Image (cartoon, rainbow, N blue to C red):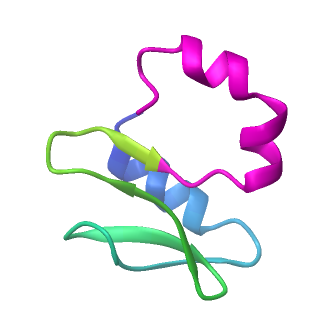
Amino acid sequence: MDLDAFVERCAAIDGAALGDGAFAPGRAVWVGRREVAHVDSDGALDVRLTKAVIRARRAELRADSRVT
């Protein structure tokens, strides 16, 4: 599945919507007034994590080279 199709599927989840990106040009997935995911121009998927998720998975996230 390509990332555009993935973003479309995410936007189809109840409570999510497709809209213009606030942090990158192009489409993004929004939940309420928060952008939760978008695809960068280099094809990388950016996903917003909550503070609680970051705190709980801090060591794992730091060890993963894909996370910046």
The image shows residue 33, relative to residue 53, as above or below, that is below
The image shows residue 58, relative to residue 50, as above or below, that is above
Residue at x-position 34% and y-position 37%: 2
Residue at x-position 72% and y-position 41%: 54
Stretch in magenta: 47-68
Residue at x-position 31% and y-position 69%: 23
State the quadrant of the C terminus.
top left
Depth check, front residue: 24 or 68: 68
Q: Is residue 52 left or right of residue 45?
A: right
Q: How many marks?
A: 0
Decide whether residue 43 is among the magenta residues: no
Residue at x-position 59% and y-position 58%: 10
The image shows residue 62, relative to residue 63, as above or below, that is below
State the quadrant of the N terminus.
top left
Decide whether residue 60 is among the magenta residues: yes
Residue 46 location in percent, x, y? 42, 48
Q: Is residue 29 left or right of residue 61?
A: left
Q: Is residue 5 left or right of residue 51?
A: left
Residue 45 location in percent, x, y? 39, 43
Residue 35 location in percent, x, y? 51, 72
